[in-house]
Image (cartoon, helix red, strand yellow):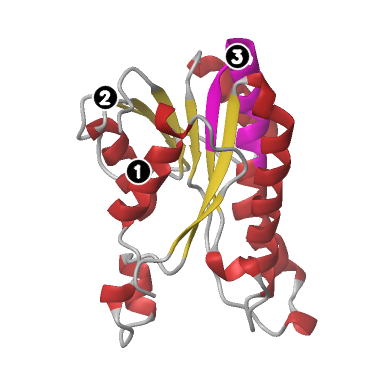
């Protein structure tokens, strides 16, 4: 697998998974533009650029992507998780928050990237779904609903663009081994969780030329869980 010569945009690049994807893509030869609301520290890698951006702002996202110039791959890593109340009592702020951070960020980034890809007659998009969103889960209705939208958007866009040189796919992780998840679930068997680098490998594969024949796939990445 190689990403040599590719220019890649990674949203959510300051998070645990985003950093893993940025690092792995650069190791595989890519030039990476990381996008997030804010960044900790300075870039540590030679082929990493950074852009601060609120991806929930559609107009700002479109302007930012246009200013980047051409690029080959979009890794939509931006997103988030929160437990909630029962499905019948989910409050609007909780519902809106899950859709804003997971759906709006993904949709706005795709809206900005696809015209660039169509002009080039090539491109690849990899979104982040969730294994838990393949069906409803207790006290997770807002999150599951939001991630299921991401998955349906992936499938729909893949069918629309597959004959125009653009691949659209998604990965479906189970619990990712992050510091926040370890803090929230200290008694869990962390060895069974998906390691960020392992998930980053799958994301990078789907953005590589080796995945040129894959369209609309929702790839489970569940580790030992």
The single residue placed furthest to the bottom in the displayed view is: 187
State the extent of the magenta-drawn residues as a range.
107-125
Q: Which of 120 and 47 is in front in this view?
A: 120
In reply to whether residue 195 is colored magenta, the answer given is no
Magenta stretch, main secondary structure, is helix
Look at the picture and state if 141 lies above or below 129.
below
| Between discs 1 and 2, the one toward the N terminus | 1
Gap between marks 1 and 3 measured at Cα: 25 Å
The single residue placed furthest to the front in the displayed view is: 213
The image quadrant of residue 33 is: top left
The image quadrant of residue 62 is: top right
Q: Nearer the viewer, residue 135 or 147?
A: 135
Please give the label number shown on residue 121: 3
Look at the picture and state if 26 lies above or below 155.
above
Q: Is mark 1 on a helix, strand or loop?
A: helix
- Residue 36 locus on image (x, y percent): 45, 41
Gap between marks 1 and 2 measured at Cα: 13 Å
Q: Which residue is drawn at 70% across and 65% down?
A: 145
Q: Which of 100 and 8 is in front in this view?
A: 8
| Between discs 1 and 3, the one toward the N terminus | 1
Q: Residue at x 61, y 53 (%)?
A: 102
Q: Is residue 70 left or right of residue 164?
A: left
Q: Mark 2 points at which residue?
A: 47
Q: Mark 1 points at which residue?
A: 21
């Amino acid at each position: 697998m190689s990403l040599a010569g590719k220019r890649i945009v990674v949203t959510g690049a300051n998070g645990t998974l985003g950093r893993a994807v940025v690092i792995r893509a650069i190791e595989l030869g890519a030039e990476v533009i990381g996008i997030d609301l804010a960044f900790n520290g300075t870039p540590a890698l030679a082929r990493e650029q950074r852009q601060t951006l609120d991806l929930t702002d559609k107009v700002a996202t479109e302007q930012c992507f246009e200013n980047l110039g051409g690029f080959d791959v979009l890794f939509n890593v931006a997103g988030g998780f929160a437990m909630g109340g029962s499905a019948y009592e989910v409050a609007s702020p909780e519902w809106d928050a899950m859709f804003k951070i997971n759906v709006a960020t993904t949709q706005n980034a795709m809206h900005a990237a696809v015209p660039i890809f169509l002009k080039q007659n090539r491109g690849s998009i990899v979104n982040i779904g969730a294994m838990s969103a393949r069906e409803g889960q207790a006290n997770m209705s807002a999150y599951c609903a939001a991630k299921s939208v991401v998955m349906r958007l992936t499938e729909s866009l893949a069918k629309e663009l597959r004959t125009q040189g653009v691949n659209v796919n998604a990965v479906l992780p189970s619990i990712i081994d992050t510091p926040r998840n370890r803090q929230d679930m200290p008694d869990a068997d962390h060895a069974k969780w998906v390691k960020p680098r392992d998930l980053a490998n799958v994301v990078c594969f789907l953005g590589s030329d080796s995945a040129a024949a894959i369209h609309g796939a929702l790839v489970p990445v569940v580790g030992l869980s």
